[in-house]
Amino acid sequence: MKYVVFVLIALLGTSLDLITKLLAFRFIEPGTVEIIPGVLRLKCVLNTGIIWGLWQGSNIIFLALSILSIPIIILLFRAVVKSESAIILIAAAFGLILAGAIGNLYDRLFYSGVRDFIDCYIINWPIFNIADSFITIGAILIIVNMFRKPRPVSQ
């Protein structure tokens, strides 16, 4: 069951990320669409750097790191679920992280940068995408799980 959850979330998450990027860049670019005026808008940008737009123009380096991240995520998932009692939560978390990594890797391969479009400008937050959200949510789930009281493993 843990592998099914991991793979399904990774596939569905990757699909959702790529579909939202396709729609955003087809129907919004080059303008913006206000979702909540003064708070949230959709604005398409190509990020050739990494998180928060740092190191712009370094796509080749981040492409290599993105390619390396995929097997590392899968290996970490396999190692963690062997000894973890909250297997479904961990499977979901790693599935989300993998979905985000694949979605952003796709962009780096085919667009030479990551397509970002969600702009929460009320707090001056960098523009991001669904893949970034999946990676963040997955990481938060793993951290939350670390503070959970372990359940006894049934035999």
Image (cartoon, helix red, strand yellow):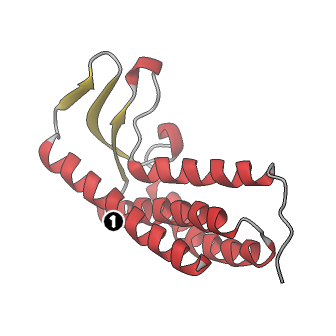
The vertical placement of 13 against 57, above or below, is below
Considering depth in this image, is 142 or 32 the residue closer to the camera?
142
Left or right for 48, reference 117:
right
Residue at screen point 72% across, 50% down: 143
Q: Horizontal and vertical percent for residue 52?
A: 50, 37
Outermost residue, front side: 154
Q: Horizontal and vertical percent for residue 70?
A: 55, 72
Considering depth in this image, is 34 or 84 the residue closer to the camera?
84
Image quarter where the C terminus lies is bottom right
Which residue matches tag 1?
15
Q: Amino acid at mark 1?
A: Ser
Q: Horizontal and vertical percent for residue 129?
A: 39, 46
Disc 1 is placed on an element classified as helix
Residue at screen point 77% across, 79% down: 82
Locate residue 154: give its quadrant.
bottom right
Residue at screen point 72% across, 74% down: 81
Outermost residue, left side: 27
Left or right for 63, reference 147:
left
Left or right for 128, reference 96:
left
Image quarter where the N terminus lies is bottom right
The vertical placement of 32 against 4, above or below, is above
Question: Alpha-carbon neighbours of circle 1 within 10 Å: few (<14), some, or many (≥20)?
Answer: some
Outermost residue, top side: 38
Residue at screen point 61% across, 76% down: 2
The vertical placement of 46 against 109, above or below, is above
Q: Horizontal and vertical percent for residue 54?
A: 52, 39
